[in-house]
Image (cartoon, grey):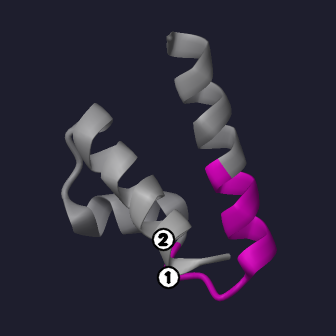
């Protein structure tokens, strides 16, 4: 996954949920090295955002 996608996901969490950058990273699992898990979490987050709009 590109760095740009990572930053976009972080920005969304920080802006929409008011999380700090550190908390947003934890929520997205950026401390995990398993890319598949990270991609699943981002997809779940994106689905949630789409449902609220």
What secondary structure predominates along the stretch shown in magenta?
helix
22 shown above or below 50: below
16 to 39, vertically: above or below: above
Q: Secondary structure at mark 2?
A: helix
Q: Which circle marks residue 4 in the picture?
A: 2
34 vs 6, nearest the viewer? 6
- Percent from the top left, x then y, of residue 12? 37, 45
Sequence-earlier tag: 1 or 2 = 2
Residue 32: percent from left, percent from top: 60, 82
Q: Tell me residue 52's x, y (percent).
A: 51, 13
Would residue 9 appear left or right of 24 to someone viewing this image?
right
Q: Residue at x 26, y 69 (%)?
A: 22
Residue at the (39%, 68%) spot, across then down: 25
Residue in the picture at 66% in, 53% down: 41
Residue named by callout 1: 31
Horizontally, residue 16 falls left or right of residue 2, namely left
Q: Are marks 1 and 2 in contact (CB under 8 Å)?
A: no
Residue 41 on the magenta segment: yes
Q: Which residues are magenta?
A: 30-42
Q: Is residue 38 magenta?
A: yes
> Helix or strand or loop: what does disc 1 sit on?
loop
Residue at the spot x=67%, y=67% of the render?
38
């Amino acid at each position: 996954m590109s760095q740009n996608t990572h930053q976009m996901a972080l920005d969304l969490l920080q802006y929409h949920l008011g999380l700090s950058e550190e908390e947003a990273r934890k929520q997205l699992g950026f401390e995990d090295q398993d890319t598949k898990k990270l991609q699943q979490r981002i997809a779940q987050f994106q689905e949630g955002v789409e449902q609220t709009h």
